[in-house]
Image: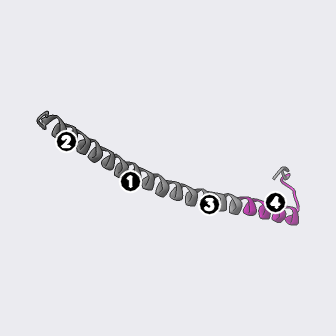
């Protein structure tokens, strides 16, 4: 759409300009849809990663508690 049509432009020129505008709008809609799909995929990946982090954090914290309890047990043993 690099041209501006004068008011007295022919019907064929106007139709060509209109067709070009329609194609540009369709291209923009297609790009918008693709971006929406990519955003949804990224959101799903983000949710999965957050869940993985939560699970790993829970495992780590349980491991720390187990280690602390084990050390406390060892400390409570009588020295021989």
Mark 1 and mark 2: Cα distance apart in space: 27 Å
Q: Nearer the viewer, mark 4 or mark 3?
A: 3
Rendered view: 14 above or below 74? below
Q: Quadrant of residue 30?
A: bottom right
Query: Quick check: is 23 in the magenta stretch?
Result: yes
Dot 2, crowdedness within 10 Å: few (<14), some or many (≥20)? few
Mark 4 and mark 1: Cα distance apart in space: 51 Å
Which residue was labeled with disc 2? 69
Q: Nearer the viewer, residue 32 or 11?
A: 32
Please provide percent x and percent y for residue 59: 32, 50
- Labels 2 and 4: the sequence-earlier one: 4
Q: Secondary structure at mark 2?
A: helix
Mark 3 and mark 1: Cα distance apart in space: 26 Å
Q: Are marks 1 and 2 in contact (CB under 8 Å)?
A: no
- Labels 2 and 3: the sequence-earlier one: 3
Rendered view: 46 above or below 22? above
Mark 2 and mark 3: Cα distance apart in space: 52 Å
Q: Secondary structure at mark 3?
A: helix
Which residue was labeled with disc 3? 34
Q: Residue at x 13, y 38 (%)?
A: 77
Span highlighted in magenta in the image: 6-24
- Labels 1 and 2: the sequence-earlier one: 1
Look at the magenta stretch and give its main secondary structure: helix
Which residue was labeled with disc 4? 17
Q: Nearer the viewer, mark 2 or mark 3?
A: 2
């Amino acid at each position: 759409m690099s041209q501006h049509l004068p008011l007295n432009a022919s019907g064929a020129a106007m139709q060509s300009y209109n067709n070009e505008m329609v194609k540009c709008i369709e291209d923009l809609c297609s790009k918008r849809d693709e971006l929406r799909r990519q955003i949804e995929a990224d959101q799903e990946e983000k949710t999965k990663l957050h869940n993985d982090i939560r699970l790993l954090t829970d495992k780590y914290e349980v491991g720390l508690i187990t280690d602390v309890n084990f050390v406390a047990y060892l400390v409570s043993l009588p020295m021989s």
